[in-house]
Image (cartoon, grey):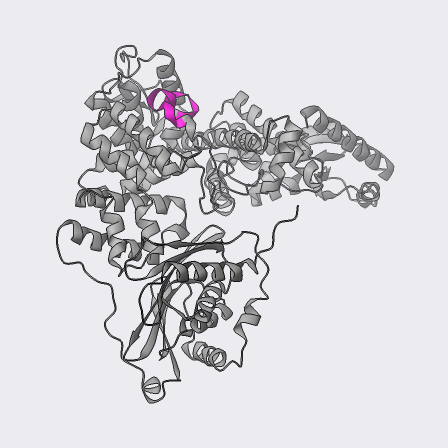
Amino acid sequence: MTAAERAERTREADALCEAAFAKAGCPESGVALVAVGGYGRGELAPYSDLDVVLVMDDAVEVGDWAGLVWYPLWDSGTTIDHSVRTVGEVLEQARADLRVATGMLDVRHLAGDPSLTLQLRTAVLTQWRRDARTRLGELRELVTSRGRTNGELAHASVPDLKESVGGLRDATVLKALVASWLVDVPHGDLERCRVALLDVRDALQTSAGRATDRVVPEYWGDIADALGLPDAQAAQVHTRRLARRLTHLSRLAWRRAEATLREPHPTRKRAPQLQRIAPGVAISFEEVVLDRGAPIGEDPLLLLRCATEAAERDLVLAPTTAARLVREGVALPDPWPAGARDLLVRLLAAGPGLLAVWETLDETGALERVLPEWERVRLLPHASVVHRFTVDRHLVETCIEAARLIRRVARPDVLMVAALLHDIGKGQLTEHCVAGEPIAREIAERIGFDADEVELIGDLVRWHLLLPETATTRDPDDPATVELVTARVRDREELELLAALTEADARATSDKAWTRWRASLVAGLVRRAAAVLADEPVPSDESDELGVPEAVARDASAVSVEVEESGDGSRVTVCSGDRIGLLADAAAMLALQRVSVRAARAWTQDHVGFSVWDVAETGLDAILLRQRLEAIVDRRIDAADRLSRVTPVRLEPTVAVRSDASPTATVIEVRSADRPGLIHTVCATLAAQEISVRSAHVSTLGPQAVDVFYVQEAFAGALSDERASAAAHAVRQALVATYAAPPR
């Protein structure tokens, strides 16, 4: 797909429109057929609509010819978006609707009176330039709202080439900003990225066989073939690199446009004035630049100083300044002097101002001078769809989140560097925590940290998933759970750093990755581990003994269900006379109500079985749940039959016994596609084996559920190796029945 092919499609459409206009018998003067939007720019994709307007001089009266223009176009099978307007009506509509205003900036003559088209184009452009200062706020809100809805093209798992941030719509907005004369944009960069994204869209629509701008994963291979790229990964990197460049240009243009609007005398030209803010660094027109006489070839800290001042003040780091320092600046020594390390930490801890400055460093090649290892993760997509950003952007977002937590730790410098490097091992053949540790140690040593600090940063990178994985998939009351943490964390200082890094990492991942529930689980685990490391008594989250409901006290076969709201979810407590299978029935009750279970714990008290379920939903009706549970217990509802009707999953289940996870119970770990009834299937299978489930801990990572079950013999503690193996085999067989192998 090339610009030549788009030009050919445009010529064919133009010929069709010219013929339709001529056949309709329109007046020779005072009437013109014009193209607007993408058609006006001559950028027709394979399945684009034709956006056309029949424009008339205000003095012309509409005749039958106005409607006859469209019939030949409809008869040809072409999809058109059309209207009939006078010049005055066009201008009025442009004043009322900003989308119309920006679309009309690309008016192109098709047929009829060319002088009318010229008049219209001049009037639209004049109106836009006159009103732009008052309309930029509205345009900015449109762009921001679109970004919230569609995400960023450079990072979204299913990006929209047109509507996502950094997409074709943003390129059009940039052209409108340039047309306003309020701000300039590097025209060559803008056009290169825009034309290349048009090529990607052409390839996408050709592959899909329809009009679409959303790239689902299966299309990347076809796009690669059409663009002559080696594989789907290369097509993703190519597209995301273009989008990130457009995003950078857009952010820079908007910052400059907003700065222009703050100018007290916009029409008065004045010479640049430098405000010195640090050695060799100054501010000019709200951008950080080099001061006069800055020792570019002598000061190795100058690049970091410029970047840090810009980020901390939330100002633009002038790209020309960064590019000049790359060309002419002196390299940092190895190891770095303490001043350079301090500047890097200040930069990383700058908060939201870091993002734009980091992008400028990356786009100008300056980042390679500071952190050459960044190339390992640049534009690297995460394997899990839970992540909303590519790996490199995620690391920057983690720094922004960590900057909010530095008051909680004794070594904020270590926290910030660990936040930057915690996923630096992604994309390697080995597990990324393991692969990232030596890389992080090498970088920390080069930055200038001492041996103990290097070891601490390496440990934080190695174990940055320890707390969330342990807290969400292990029984918090089992002593082995705390030992799992304290065996890997040296002291309370490291534990505090690890807790802060865990929160920052999760918040940067997605909203679902750091819920109140997950935060409470991690906080509880940290409290226990901190007590052990300080040789203090270990606090317990075990609930006080619950009172036996009156109905169950009278009749052990009765069931009781209570619901308590708890932050971002609910806690459901179920009790009845103690028996194996009660947990399975309770799981079925929740599954049939489509309730998402996050954790469950079960125990026996005074011959009564209790189970407590932490679930994601709120507003649950305890009476309805109890009635559903009674029907399941009485076998008036066949839960197994109903839950077997769910759509088969395409992620093959795995079941493993973790023999070293607990001294008092056998731990069975199940990985499967998340689906309703998964916990019921496991618990019912174990109940059929006369095995008691003491607790269940549920964690969902993208499409995969990682569920951990602590099981015991009914009266004899942990299972024997033989029984554990048989139980795992039975669970695996039960889950395989729900697995549908993908078609060959």
- Tally of numbered discs: 0
Residue placed farthest to the front in the image? 722
| Residue nearer the viewer, 664 or 61 | 664
Locate residue 737, reporting x and y percent. Answer: 57, 60
**Residue farthest toward the bottom in the current orientation of the protein:** 554
421 or 332, which is in the foreground?
Answer: 421
Left or right: 348, with 338 as reference point: right
* Residue 368 on the magenta segment: yes
Q: Residue at x 25, y 66 (%)?
A: 542
Q: Quadrant of the C terminus?
A: top right
- Residue 462 in sight from this viewpoint: yes
- Residue 272 image position (x, y, % from top left): 34, 19
Hey, which quadrant is residue 95 in on the image? top right
Q: Split into 4 quadrants, where in the image is the N terminus?
A: top right
Residue in view at x 55 percent, y 42 percent: 98
Tell me which residue sits at (24%, 26%) in the image.
341
Q: Which residues are magenta?
A: 362-374
Q: Quadrant of residue 577?
A: bottom left
Residue 667 in the image, given as x and y percentages of width and height: 36, 58
Residue 201 appears in the rendering? no
Residue 365: within the magenta?
A: yes
Magenta span main SS: helix
Q: Position of residue 526 (x, y in %)?
A: 24, 52
445 over 418 or under it: above or below = above
In this picture, residue 58 sits left or right of residue 242: right
Residue at the limit of the structure toward the left, as seen here = 535
Q: Nearer the viewer, residue 57 or 208?
A: 208
Q: Residue at x 41, y 77 (%)?
A: 622
Q: Say whether residue 405 is left or right of residue 319.
A: left
